[in-house]
Image (cartoon, grey):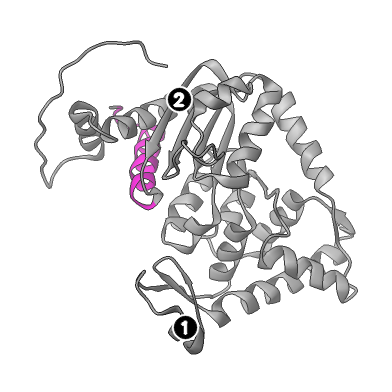
Amino acid sequence: MPEWRLEPVEDIRVSPSMTLSELIDAYARMHGFMAGHLARAVDLLRRGLRESSLRVLSFTGNLVSTGLRGVLAQLVGSGLFNVVVTTTGAVDHDVARAVGGVYYKGYFEADDAELLEKGYHRLGNVFIPVESYGPKVEEFVRRLVEEAVRRGMSEAGTFEILRLAGELLEDEGSILRQAYKAGADVFVPGWPDGAFGTSLFMEAQRGNRVRIDYYRDMKRLADLFFGTKGKAAALIIGGGISKHHTIWWSQFRDGLDYVVYVTTAVEYDGSLSGAHPREAVSWGKVKPQAERVVVYADATIALPIIAAGILDARQGGSES
């Protein structure tokens, strides 16, 4: 944690011509309330990703239904992160959109019975035509499994199946495609919990047998978390299984050295999603001396700024 040092809060002025670094610096100077946390997150990640050998990006599936998918693909493709931990929902939305599914701008107040009648799923204020989701995923998984069988992959971990998926997908805006190109492994611990996993099961029922063995993923995770020397950093967006899987494995290397949580969940109910990094210290998942910060914010607002800030530093921009 940063040392105590009292600095005055400063009034800021904004300009349409402000650079990104100037905006982040303004957040740091205005400080309250989450502005200071966001500025610290950028600074922490700039240093942490530069100094760490193991660099994990963890996020939830809902974000991939939005245009934030492009930012996530950009982060993965940049090489800033070499491990991705996410959910089956993220794979579903990434695949569906990669093979031509179109998602639409909607609104929270929609009548869901009307949407059902018209053939739309609703995810928050995103409308998803039925034909742009399940059928798209099922069609792709059928092709994926056929290719896996052709290559002799009778048994595979999810990271291996998703690596092949990234190879087959032609959409350069796909997270899986960018992970494949960057050589980053993608892990989905709850792989049956969505259209992608269910489609794999249905293909097995049809006789196209590719057995998913998550022990293979665990062996790969063990190799990465035990075998990668040096420091470890993680950017964890949202909660749930992807967050827990990331910090669970981190305990086996005595915890993360740098960690940023971006969340809207609160800790008072004892949930893992709302738990702060300080709680992870008690489990050995985050080192006591680790640099850590929680940004309470909607990821669709905060992550583009954080991503641009760390990409700016990667490309030689000035640091805030």
- Magenta: main secondary structure equals helix
Q: 137 and 248: which one is in front?
A: 248
Residue 54 seen: yes
Question: What amino acid type should be assigned to the residue bearing mark 1?
Answer: Ala
Neighbour tally class for label 1: few under 14, some 14-19, many 20 plus, Cα within 10 Å = few
Left or right of 89: which side holds 6? left
- Secondary structure under tag 2 reads strand
Badge number at residue 62: none
Left or right of 86: which side holds 121? left
Residue 309 on the magenta span: yes
Whether residue 42 is situated above or below residue 141 in the rendered picture:
above
Residue 191: x and y, percent? 71, 56
Q: Quadrant of residue 184?
A: top right
- Secondary structure under tag 1 reads helix
Q: Earlier in the sequence, mark 1 or mark 2?
A: 1
In the rendered image, the residue lying farthest to the front is 269
Residue visible at 83% across and 43% down? 215
Query: In which quadrant is the N terminus drawn?
Result: top left
Residue visible at 53% across and 69% down? 97
Residue 85 seen: no
Residue 308 on the magenta span: yes
- Look at the image and give the residue range highlighted in magenta: 300-319
Say whether marks 1 and 2 touch (CB < 8 Å): no
Question: What amino acid type should be assigned to the residue bearing mark 2?
Answer: Arg
Whether residue 198 is situated above or below residue 315 in the rendered picture:
below
Residue visible at 89% across and 66% down? 209
Name the residue that disc number 2 marks: 292
Name the residue that disc number 1 marks: 113
